[in-house]
Amino acid sequence: MVEEFSALPLTGANFPDWETVMGAQGGCYGCWCTYFRLKSEARDAMSRDDRKHYMHDIVQNGAAPGIIGYLNGVAVGWVQVGPRMDVPRWNGVRTVSHPVDQADAQDENVWAVSCFFVVRSQRGKGLSHRLLGAAVEFARQRQARVLDACPIDKAKQSASVGLFVGPSRIFHAAGFQEIALRKAGRPLMRLTL
């Protein structure tokens, strides 16, 4: 059977699909994809349910913070993509992902691909490539000027939680170029749209 991939922005209508992808634990240790969105103190003070509700509120207020990937109509993956300003922890001066030009952190046309999550049964099947392709197209449609990423070159294991930022190889394959290297194995990469 040929598997048909499709992708949709996260909205209130498909929020239950996102919950399915993230699972009962909420993705990586109950994160619900809030790690780069909230200051550590605020995030740590929240329960898993609070984090999920935080993301639900973002979606209900009209923002689409990323893309859900589907195989044959079944939700199987997620990529967080949007303006850099929406992921303030991604912009901190002590992070490997901070912008080369600090003004990019407030430019609504400078976007970031910050997180991936694929359901366990579908890992290792190339879905990250497809999710990234959908993220690039989504950014183009929303008039992003550039798309940044700060992936990891190598993880200790192919199922490592560190891969939530995506493996560098998929960004290279999609045409991203390295623009800074602040830590070995964690290049800051950019695609001009």
Image (cartoon, rainbow, N blue to C red):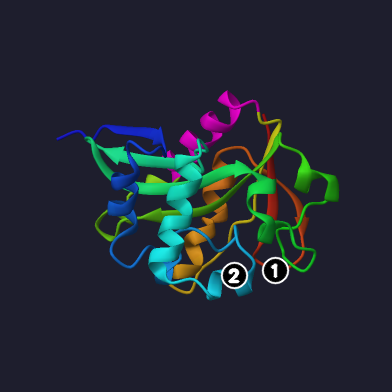
127 falls in the magenta region = no
Question: Secondary structure of the magenta portion, mostly?
Answer: helix
The kind of residue on which mark 2 rests is Ala
Q: Secondary structure at mark 2?
A: helix
**Nearer to me, 22 or 129:** 22
Q: Residue at x 64, y 55 (%)?
A: 150
Residue 176: x and y in percent read 64, 41
The answer for how far apart the CA atoms under marks 1 and 2 are is 29 Å
76 versus 24 height, above or below? above
The kind of residue on which mark 1 rests is Ala
Residue 27: x and y in percent read 39, 63
Disc 2 target residue: 42
178 versus 141 height, above or below? below
Disc 1 target residue: 184
Quarter of the image with the N terminus in it: top left
Horizontal side, residue 153 vs residue 191: left or right: left
The stretch in magenta equals 129-143
- Which circle's residue, 1 or 2, is located before the other in the chain? 2
170 versus 153 height, above or below? above
142 falls in the magenta region = yes
Q: Residue at x 65, y 25 (%)?
A: 143
User: Exactly how many numbered labels are in the figure?
Assistant: 2
Q: Residue at x 53, y 75 (%)?
A: 45
Residue 20: x and y in percent read 27, 53
